Image (spheres, helix red, strand yellow):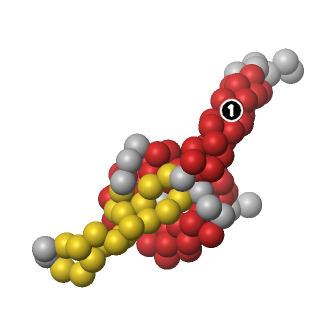
Amino acid sequence: MNLENTQVQMRKGILEYCILHIISRGEVYASDMLEELTSAKIMVVEGTLYPLLTRLRKAGLVEYKWVESSSGPPRKYYTLTEDGGTFLNSLNETWKGLVKSTRLITSKKTTK
């Protein structure tokens, strides 16, 4: 079993949740999301973020608008839709349950 592969899979499993949280704070540019995810050691690969943002948009959970930039091409700024907010609230409840269950399992002492 490869430890690094397992760690990557664990991070990928919570990536969508983290991205929705970042977007829920207000309009955000993709490179700012990448920076936050990278600094939190969740993700460092651009090629993972953009397809996920496209899937979230197609699912109606996020939307974007183009904003002109004085220093280059226009930028896409993402926001959460109403459905995205409802979806994130449900994920929050799921996350709380998972954290509670994980703590319960990992905090037990060995009985042997």
Q: Is residue 84 above or below residue 91?
A: below
Three-letter code for the amino acid on which mark 1 is drawn: Glu
Q: Quadrant of residue 109?
A: top right
Residue 79 spot, x, y in % from top left: 44, 55
Residue 30 spot, x, y in % from top left: 38, 65
Q: Is residue 56 above or below residue 109?
A: below
Which residue shows up at 70% across the image and 25% down it?
A: 100
Front residue of this view, candidates 1 and 55: 55
User: From the viewer's perspective, is 42 left or right of 7?
Assistant: left
Q: Quadrant of residue 58?
A: bottom right
Characterize the local packing of mark 1: few (<14), some (14-19) or many (20 or more) Cα atoms within 10 angstroms. few
Q: Residue furthest bottom?
A: 73
The residue pinned by badge 1 equals 93
Which residue shows up at 65% across the image and 54% down it?
A: 13
Residue 1 spot, x, y in % from top left: 74, 61
Front residue of this view, candidates 13 and 108: 13
- Image quadrant for the C terminus? top right
Front residue of this view, candidates 65 and 20: 65
Residue 98 in sight: yes
User: From the viewer's perspective, is 42 left or right of 28?
Assistant: right
Which residue shows up at 39% across the image and 67% down it?
A: 65
Residue 44 in sight: no
